[in-house]
Image: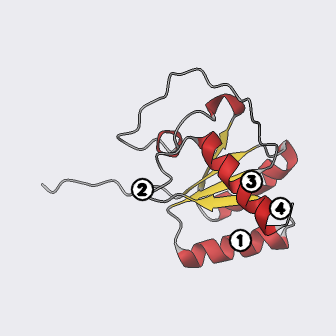
């Protein structure tokens, strides 16, 4: 009998998105068979790998103090191929569901705390828009 290796799931994590927009994004993600999970404020001290439920990433039990909050909406894309990603982003624009901060999970950022990634994305966004 051959061992079965589970394939990583296509996922999108979302943060700080209001109910109406997140409901519309959920419908879109369901159309594309992509898992859609909310990251709440108290989860910001966890690594991306842990939030994605990947093996080898453990819960960070340190108390998270959000002394530098990020108020922007954010989407984190995981394991979505280029063609599907392009189609998905196009649909997000067509449906006027734009979100300022977006990123893909990489080998380098999978071990970052979510809050640290938010701060970096905000910094990059501000730099691109001369803020």
Q: Is residue 17 left or right of residue 51?
A: right
Check disc 4: other Cα within 10 Å, few if <14, some if 14-19, many if 20+. Answer: few
The residue shown at (37%, 58%) is 7
Please tell me whether residue 21 is drawn above or below residue 114 in the rendered image: below
Give the position of the C terminus as an image quadrant: bottom right
Residue farthest along the left direction in this orientation? 1
Reading the image, the residue beneath label 1 is 89
Work out whether mark 1 precedes mark 3 in sequence or the reverse, and give the earlier one: 1
102 left or right of 2 in image: right
* Rendering quarter of residue 58: top left
**Residue at image x 52%, y 58%?**
10
User: Which circle's residue, 4 or 2, is located before the other in the chain?
Assistant: 2
For marks 1 and 3, give the CA distance. Answer: 19 Å
Disc 1, SS = helix
Expressed as whole percent of the image width and height from the top left, the position of residue 88 reads 68, 70
Answer whether labels 3 and 2 touch (C-beta < 8 Å): no
**Mark closer to the chain start, 3 or 2:** 2
> In the rendering, at what x and y percent does residue 16 appear?
78, 43
Dot placed on the residue nearer the N-terminal end, 1 or 2: 2
Residue 26 visible in image: no
In this figure, which residue is indicated by the disc labeled 2?
8
Q: Which residue is mark 4?
A: 97
**Residue identifier under label 3:** 122
């Amino acid at each position: 009998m051959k061992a079965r290796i589970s394939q990583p799931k296509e996922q999108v994590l979302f943060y700080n998105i209001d109910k109406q927009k997140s409901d519309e994004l959920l419908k879109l993600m369901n159309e594309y068979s992509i898992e859609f999970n909310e990251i709440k404020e108290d989860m910001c001290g966890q690594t991306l790998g842990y939030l994605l439920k990947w093996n080898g990433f453990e819960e960070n039990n340190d108390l998270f103090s959000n002394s530098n909050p990020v108020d922007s909406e954010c989407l984190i894309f995981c394991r979505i191929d280029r063609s599907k990603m392009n189609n998905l982003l196009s649909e997000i624009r067509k449906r006027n569901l734009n979100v300022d901060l977006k990123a893909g999970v990489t080998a380098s950022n999978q071990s970052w705390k979510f809050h640290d990634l938010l701060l970096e994305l905000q910094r990059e966004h501000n730099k691109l828009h001369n803020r």
